[in-house]
Amino acid sequence: MIDSHCHLDSKDFDADRDEVIARALAAGVETMVAIGTGDGPPDLEAGIRLADKHDAFYATVGVHPHDASKATPETFKRLAELLKHPKVVAAGEIGLDYHYDFSPRDTQRAVFIEQMRIAADAGKPIVIHTREAWEDTVALISEHWRGGGIMHCFSGGAGEARQALALGFHLSFGGIVTFPKALNIQDAAKSTPADRLLIETDAPYLAPVPKRGKRNEPAYIVETARKLADLRGESLEAVAQTTASNFRKLCLGYTQ
């Protein structure tokens, strides 16, 4: 299995990061993607530091919408440079978050647009964070993006899934899909074409049932994959193989 989105740079893992990684490998997680937004600019290398240290990691680089107000012209210049790093597979997570509004919405939109431009120049996919901002996110992608990407921790229903798929995106499902009341997300998971399906943990957040409420970690992705298999009438092995193959094709440029 491939965990397409985790935050193992988080302070939540400072005490036992190596043990967490070992548990993931033992559980059958062959690859983890360290999302490189960290605490925001000027540091853009939170994911790269893990990827440089551990063979099992790839990384992304990007400015999270929470940190959009921290971005400067130097940030964008550095982002373009880091997208050339051999273990950086995407720009992300980028997008819009209107729930917290930690950065002004017009600033979020401007930083999102600029990062899409930089990713396009680099030929890299984008990893989208959107919360309570679906219509604006879709509108900006439609206007400014022509390429693949990942809807991180997809939490919409079948209608939003169709919109994202029409834009060429993969849908990445996390622990929320295991929650009993997440019926809309489960409907989307059932209808997502096999070649657009990904899985993630978003660790340390959103641990799946039966670990809900605990610190999430990449080893728990097995529970998410198992739920997807149940929803789709497939085997756990099939979901693991399909999602890993999809990630390799989208982010690494080949299929196994």
Image (cartoon, grey):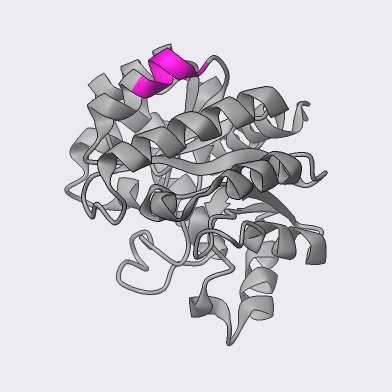
In the rendered structure, does residue 144 fall within the stretch colored magenta? yes
Left or right of 34? Residue 179 is: left
Which percent across, then down, holds residue 158?
26, 23
Report the span colored magenta: 140-145
Where 143 falls versus 206 (above or below)?
above
User: At which x and y percent is residue 215?
Assistant: 41, 73
Q: Can the viewer see residue 2 in this picture?
A: no
Q: Main secondary structure of the magenta part?
A: helix
Extreme left residue here?
A: 181
Left or right position of 98 against 175 = left
For the C terminus, the image quarter is: top right
Q: Quadrant of residue 122?
A: top right
Q: Residue furthest front?
A: 73
Of residues 171 and 90, the one nearer the viewer is 90
Residue 127 against residue 1 in the figure, above or below: above
Please report the residue visible at 27 percent of the width from the left and 41 percent of the height from the top: 105
Q: Quadrant of residue 51?
A: bottom right
Note whether 150 is above or below 201 in the view shown.
above
Asked whether residue 226 is in view, the answer is: yes
Q: Residue at x 32, y 19 (%)?
A: 139
Is 233 magenta? The answer is no
Q: Residue furthest bottom?
A: 15
Viewed as shown, does residue 228 lie left or right of 182?
right
Question: Quadrant of the rendered structure where residue 213 is?
Answer: bottom left
Taking depth in this image into account, of 222 and 251 the one nearest to the observer is 251
For image coordinates 53% across by 55% down, the residue present is: 37
Where is residue 242? Give x, y as percent.
Answer: 60, 31
